[in-house]
Image (cartoon, helix red, strand yellow):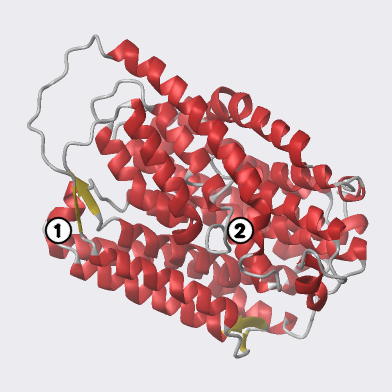
Amino acid sequence: MTLVRLKKKGMGAFWNCLGISFFVALPLMTEVCFAAGDAVHDIGRHLPVWTVIPFGGILLSIALCPLLAPRFWHHHFGKAAAFWTLAFAVPFLVYFKEIAAYEILHILLVDYIPFIILLWGLFTIAGGIAVSGSLKGTPIVNTILLLIGTILASWVGTTGASMVMIRPLLRANKERVKKAHIICFFIFLVANIGGSLTPLGDPPLFLGFLHNVPFFWVTTSVLPHMLLATVILLAVFFGIDRYHYGREETLPREEETKTPIRIEGLYNFLFLAGVIGIILVSGYWRPGHISIFGIEMHYQNLLRDAVIIILGLLSLYATPQRLRQANDFSWGPIKEVAKLFAGIFITIIPALAILKAGSQGALAWLVTSVNTPAHYFWASGILSSFLDNAPTYLTFFNMSLGRLGLSEAMIPAALATGTAASNPQFIAYLTAIAAGSVFMGANTYIGNAPNFMVKSIAEEAGVKMPSFFGYMFKYSIPILIPVFIIITYIFF
């Protein structure tokens, strides 16, 4: 593949990603104009629980089809996602008309498009960073790589750290026979738990930052929980990896000439820093918004998305072809994520609306049963395992504010430990919500955006990853759930 073809395919992948959303969005814009005058849509009060069936359907398709019909899924996963999307969107539009059009267009413009732009930008930039040299995937080396990725995740985001670290990890373990467990622990630590210390790490924490939670509050509040989880998981990983590695040492290994470790494409770290910087700026700079078909589009968010696109294109054109070839770089994973998550974002609408309706929605029993920090930790965590963890965080965040009679303006003072205005109960609630939303995103492949992308990249590299349920029952439930129980017992 020539460099020109790679760049053209990169642009094609980007426009393909955006085209998925605009293809759905454009026919709705006329309808939305009529709904623009409605300030609030409380459809969650009227939606029954069975409206989440299409969402469950797309999750089951992701879980079962690669196992039961792998050839069909490989060629037609986009059509399967489109089927479940239409199964929800058509009756939703027929019954709620303009309001339904507004809700679908809102989640595409405000949530999905920025989401896929960020993923595309980080995927493109990180794909130009090549680590070469004799890096052998021993248990000690793998543990160190996981630790480095975990530390990076809070400062360059779970997606950025995952895209930077996954290819060196795969290359180091190229000769290993048993390596699916390495990728699963990578998802646990780098793609999720590592991003729990700053608003840059994971989308839920960034939402909290946008709603007046101080930038470094989460760093000190969740640090003990994160350190405990990381130490336990790294120790468990080292034991498991050492066991598998010991059994493989009897296999004949090809001798290779040792070469020093070298990192090429370092200028891409400047592009990564630019992405993180503009995300940070968008949290502090709030110049106002423009209304597009009745949907508020904030200027800082539009600037953020534009800058990320520019930085991704600069990386694409500045990085030599050989570096991306050395990374086995292709656009397949980002296309798969774009298509599947377009369906997930649309079919998730009723689940989020019902949750936001609180005690007036069909899941009132769940909302009213959440009372203690431990409840908040597990409720926000379990829902974040299957729903988008950002709106799940925001739902419980607002629930805790309402329970304690606090406004957003009162949050900094309420979180200032040791002052007269501090609110220990709110501190406990918010710590539990932050930890639950970020940590338990590791419970499934769809709990956090990088999970699915890491899985796709690993599979393209020849790693036989467990199925959706295989991942849960073989890895996340027996390994993560006991860790979360320990955290609950000690902290909550």
Q: Dividing the picture into quarters, in which one does residue 176 lie? A: top left
Question: Which residue is pictured at 83% across the width and 60% down the height?
Answer: 426
Q: Dividing the picture into quarters, in which one does residue 50 lie? A: top right
Q: Earlier in the sequence, mark 1 or mark 2?
A: 2
Q: Inspect the image, locate mark 1, and give the three-letter code of the amino acid beneath it.
A: Gln
Residue 313 vs residue 166, the one in the foreground: 166
Mark nearer the viewer, 1 or 2: 2
Determine crowd level at label 2: few under 14, some 14-19, many 20+ residues with C-alpha closer than 10 A. some
Q: Quadrant of the C terminus?
A: top right
User: To which residue does mark 1 refer?
Assistant: 321
Task: Tell me how many marks there are.
Answer: 2
- Place of residue 252 in the rendered image (x, y in percent of width and height, measured from the top left): 17, 13
Question: Which residue is pictured at 45% across the width and 65% down the height?
Answer: 118
For residue 31, above or below residue 200: below
- Place of residue 323 in the rendered image (x, y in percent of width and height, measured from the top left): 17, 54
Residue 427 vs residue 158, the one in the foreground: 427
- Report the side of 127 relative to 320 (left or right): right
Could you tell me which secondary element the residue under label 1 belongs to? helix
Q: Which mark is residue 219?
A: 2
For residue 245, above or below residue 61: above
Q: Quadrant of the N terminus?
A: bottom left
Determine crowd level at label 1: few under 14, some 14-19, many 20+ residues with C-alpha closer than 10 A. some
- Report the side of 189 relative to 377 (left or right): left
* Disc 1 from disc 2: Cα separation: 39 Å
Question: Which residue is pictured at 66% across the width and 63% down the height?
Answer: 217
- Place of residue 305 in the rendered image (x, y in percent of width and height, measured from the top left): 46, 75
Q: Residue furthest left?
A: 257
